[in-house]
Image: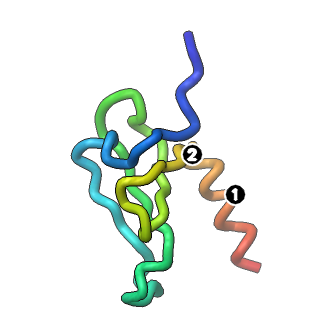
């Protein structure tokens, strides 16, 4: 079995996802957005993209990797 990609070239390739951003974000559009793909080969992964480039690439992370990443900022 081949490994899943770690990113997608364009976040528009993730059809039907709902992109969310933190309630702490300002209207300046300078934050990250996250989405949970619910179908296709990316099901179960977390997608992350730059809000300034909504058609740009998206990183794909396992839920555990995202938890570890965000935990680093909670201290």
How dense is the environment of label 1, judged by Cα within 10 Å: few (below 14), some, or many (20 and up)? few
Quadrant in the rendering for residue 34: bottom left
Apparent side of residue 26 relative to residue 14 in the rendered image (left or right): right
Residue lying at 38% horizontally and 48% vertically, measured from the top left: 11
52 vs 46, nearest the viewer: 52
Which callout, 1 or 2, points at the residue further toward the start of the chain? 2
Q: Position of residue 17 (x, y in %)?
A: 28, 50
Mark whose residue sits in front, 1 or 2:
2
How dense is the environment of label 2, judged by Cα within 10 Å: few (below 14), some, or many (20 and up)? some
Apparent side of residue 53 relative to residue 15 in the rendered image (left or right): right
Q: Is disc 2 placed on a helix, strand or loop?
A: strand
Q: Which residue is mark 2?
A: 61
Q: Position of residue 21 (x, y in %)?
A: 40, 72
The single residue placed furthest to the left in the displayed view is: 16
Q: Position of residue 40 (x, y in %)?
A: 32, 29
Above-or-below relation of 48 to 31: above
Q: Which residue is mark 1?
A: 68
Apparent side of residue 34 relative to residue 68 in the rendered image (left or right): left
Residue lying at 56% horizontally and 10% vertically, measured from the top left: 1
Q: Which mark is residue 28?
A: none
Quadrant in the rendering for residue 38: top left
CA–CA distance in space, label 1 to label 2: 11 Å
Colouring used for the render: rainbow
């Amino acid at each position: 079995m081949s490994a899943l990609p770690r990113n997608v070239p364009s976040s528009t390739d993730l059809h039907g996802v709902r992109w969310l951003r933190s309630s702490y974000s300002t209207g300046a559009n300078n934050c990250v957005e996250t989405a949970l793909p619910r179908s296709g080969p990316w099901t179960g992964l977390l997608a992350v993209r730059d809000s300034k480039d909504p058609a740009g690439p998206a990183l794909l992370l396992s839920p555990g990797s995202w938890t570890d990443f965000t935990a680093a900022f909670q201290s």
